[in-house]
Image (cartoon, grey):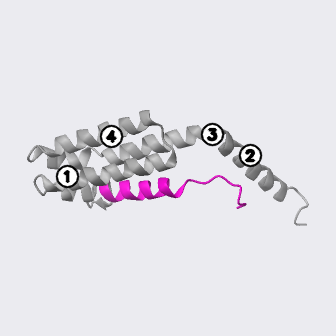
Amino acid sequence: MSSSELKAPDALRKAQKMAHLLDSAIGIPFTKIRFGLDSILGLVPGLGDLVGVALSAHIIRLAAQVGAPLSLRITMIRNAIFDFLIGLIPFIGDISDIFYKANRKNIRLLESWWINTHHEQISKQAAGHLAEWQKSTEPGKYD
């Protein structure tokens, strides 16, 4: 990989890892259900939800470091606030934390924005890799 190749910024990768930890790091055996630290924190009345929304805010700060526009960050904030408010409802909030994954949703939004923003560079880079691969597989190259 050359130094001029486009790659995901560190802040985006950190946000992806954090969202996974918060929303889907733990799987329930024999099901497709996954949950994370946010669901566990939410079991602690009030305080757990505050810690969860603070961690969600950190993901939004990482989005700002990546250069995400304000409109995208506002959508991410809305998702985090919705998750926080639902989490405050006893029992219903605890169950909803397993199924409504605001952090994963926010990461999908951030990833889509980043890919769309860098689409031209990604396409050029992919075309270059494809051309290199085609050259290396030409007949007679290894005869």
- Which is nearer the N-term, disc 4 or disc 2? 4
Q: Residue at x 36, y 40 (%)?
A: 76
Secondary element at tag 2: helix
| Total numbered labels placed on residues in the image | 4
Does the image show residue 32? no
The disc at residue 31 is none
Q: Is residue 41 left or right of residue 8?
A: left
Q: Nearer the viewer, residue 34 or 137?
A: 34
Residue range in magenta is 1-23
Magenta segment includes 10:
yes
Q: Nearer the viewer, mark 3 or mark 1?
A: 1
Q: Residue at x 56, y 53 (%)?
A: 8
- The residue at which mark 1 appears reads as 50
- The residue at which mark 4 appears reads as 77
Disc 1 from disc 2: Cα separation: 46 Å
In percent of width and height, residue 31 lies at 27, 55
The disc at residue 127 is 2
- Which is nearer the N-term, disc 1 or disc 2? 1
Secondary element at tag 3: helix
**Local crowd at mark 3 within 10 Å, few (<14), some, or many (≥20)?**
few
Q: Nearer the viewer, residue 125 or 78?
A: 78
In percent of width and height, residue 22 lies at 31, 56
Q: Is residue 136 left or right of residue 53?
A: right
- The residue at which mark 3 appears reads as 119
Q: Residue at x 20, y 52 (%)?
A: 50
Q: Nearer the viewer, mark 2 or mark 3?
A: 3
Looking at the figure, which quarter contains the N terminus? bottom right
Magenta segment includes 132:
no
Disc 4 from disc 2: Cα separation: 36 Å
